Image (cartoon, rainbow, N blue to C red):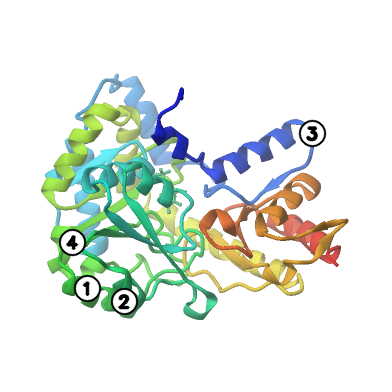
């Protein structure tokens, strides 16, 4: 075997693959509308971009400490205090090349072979593979529309064993766009208190993109600060600050875990980009008014997306409260025929939509559940409307 067993388990990120195929079709001259990638379509905010230019001009272009500059770690700690009223020292903050890698490194330093990490389905497409790459086992709990696709604390407790290392969850959630309320989180706190060996990996990457009027999504540590020693929270520049390409993410958590992540990163990535770190400081300090405008924009786009999807018969969804996704139930159409092909799963639906109607969507199966599509509404309103019109044309043809 040329490749390792690890590589043989490896699955390329399906959303990135779909986005690449959408780009290929565009390059061939097709008018593709992609609702696939979880990425804002507006530019990085001016203050952050300017700071990036400044960093280059001032020759801030050398290695930084592996865990990020002290200035950025202090800025992050201050921000977490402002947003969530949780106090961290700079030694309890680690910066890395994107939230994705920081979650990856947390799993690497926490998990040993045979450990279990609990996630819900639908999940963010990368979680199961990241857990497997840390030699641990994803324990997936399926959620349904009955619970509004939110993991129930009692279902979580049922799967806890001595091997359970952590629960990994995301609020607001990718792909559902729904966030956990204080009441729901309280139930998790009760369960976690009964199982002191379980860590919490809280992916907060969308916590500033709340569409219900609240400023920040409720956090487990606001409810139970006493869990601080076993909660690692992840955030970054990609979503609220529209900095996906700058690759800056961070984690806050107990010093021993954060130090281990820093050591891991020092061997794996060296340091995050010095230029991007400088820009991230400006983003955090200066871009609150830009985030407020973004929320307004997303609220409008969400309304357009919901209205457009409602025009397609037999599709169902819950109104998202955060992030920029609609999680649409298309299960009514499973078993129907398109031309002479029977539709067995949502991957087929997504593929036909892309190849024949030039609309990019993420199939629910990539998030662990069949019968759904994830649609991003971080896309211009006219494009959302046109994409939904094409989807309507497709679903009308199913017999
Ligand atoms: C739930 C979730 N976590 C993490 C990430 C990764 O963010 P980053 O660009 O900082 O690696 C994403 C991006 O799509 C995401 O949706």
Residue 122: image location, x then y, percent: 49, 62
Q: Which of the two labelled residues, at mark 4 and mark 1, occupies the earlier sequence position?
A: 4
Q: Mark 4 points at which residue?
A: 86
Q: Name the residue under label 1.
A: 223
- Cα gap from disc 1 to disc 2, whole angstroms: 7 Å
Residue at (43% x, 65% y) in the render: 210
Nearer to us of marks 2 and 4 is 2
Q: Determine whether, in the image, residue 177 is placed left or right of residue 373.
A: left
Q: SS class of the residue under badge 4? A: loop
Disc 3/disc 1 C-alpha distance (Å): 52 Å
Which numbered circle lies on residue 29?
Answer: 3
Between the residue at mark 4 and the residue at mark 1, the CA separation in whole angstroms equals: 11 Å
Q: In this view, does 57 lie to the left or right of 93?
A: right
* Element type at mark 3: loop
Q: Quadrant of the C terminus?
A: bottom right
Q: In the rendering, at what x and y percent does residue 279 appear?
A: 34, 36
Q: Does the residue labelled 2 lie within 8 Å of ligand 1?
A: no
Q: Nearer the viewer, mark 4 or mark 3?
A: 3
Residue at 35 percent of width and 66 percent of height: 217
Decide if residue 311 is on the left or right side of residue 16.
right
Q: Can you see residue 240?
A: no
């Amino acid at each position: 075997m040329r490749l390792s067993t690890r590589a043989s388990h490896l699955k390329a990120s399906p959303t990135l693959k779909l986005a690449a195929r959408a780009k290929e079709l565009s390059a061939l001259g097709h008018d593709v509308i992609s609702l696939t990638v979880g990425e804002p379509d507006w530019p990085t905010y001016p203050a952050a971009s300017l700071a990036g230019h400044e960093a280059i001009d001032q020759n801030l272009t050398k290695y930084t400490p592996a865990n990020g500059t002290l200035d950025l770690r202090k800025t992050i700690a201050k921000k977490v205090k402002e947003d969530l009223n949780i106090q961290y020292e700079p030694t309890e903050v680690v910066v890395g090349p994107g939230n994705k890698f920081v979650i990856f490194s947390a799993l690497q330093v926490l998990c040993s072979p045979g450990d279990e990490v609990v996630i819900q389905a639908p999940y963010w497409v990368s979680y199961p593979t990241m857990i497997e790459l840390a030699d641990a086992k994803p324990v997936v709990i399926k959620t349904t529309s009955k619970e509004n696709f939110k993991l129930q604390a009692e279902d979580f407790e049922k799967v806890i064993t001595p091997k359970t290392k952590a629960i990994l969850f995301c609020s607001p959630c990718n792909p559902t766009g729904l966030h956990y309320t204080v009441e729901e989180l309280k139930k998790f706190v009760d369960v976690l208190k009964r199982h002191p060996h379980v860590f919490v990996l809280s992916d907060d990457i969308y916590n500033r993109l709340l569409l219900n009027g609240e400023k920040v999504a409720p956090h487990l540590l606001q409810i139970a600060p006493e869990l601080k020693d076993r909660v690692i929270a992840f955030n970054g520049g990609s979503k609220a600050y529209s900095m996906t390409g700058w690759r800056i993410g961070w984690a806050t958590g107990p010093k021993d875990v954060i130090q281990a992540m820093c050591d891991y990163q020092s061997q794996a990535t060296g340091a995050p980009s010095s230029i991007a770190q400088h820009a991230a400081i400006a983003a955090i300090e200066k871009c609150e008014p830009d985030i407020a405008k973004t929320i307004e924009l997303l609220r409008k786009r969400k309304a357009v997306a919901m209205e457009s999807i409602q025009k397609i018969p037999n599709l169902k969804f819950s109104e998202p409260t955060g992030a920029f996704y609609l999680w649409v139930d298309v299960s009514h159409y499973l078993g129907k025929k398109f031309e002479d092909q029977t539709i067995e799963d949502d991957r087929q639906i997504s593929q036909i939509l892309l190849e024949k109607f030039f609309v990019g969507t993420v199939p629910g199966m990539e998030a662990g559940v069949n019968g759904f599509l994830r649609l991003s509404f971080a896309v211009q309103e006219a494009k959302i409307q046109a994409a939904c019109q094409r989807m309507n044309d497709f679903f009308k043809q199913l017999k």
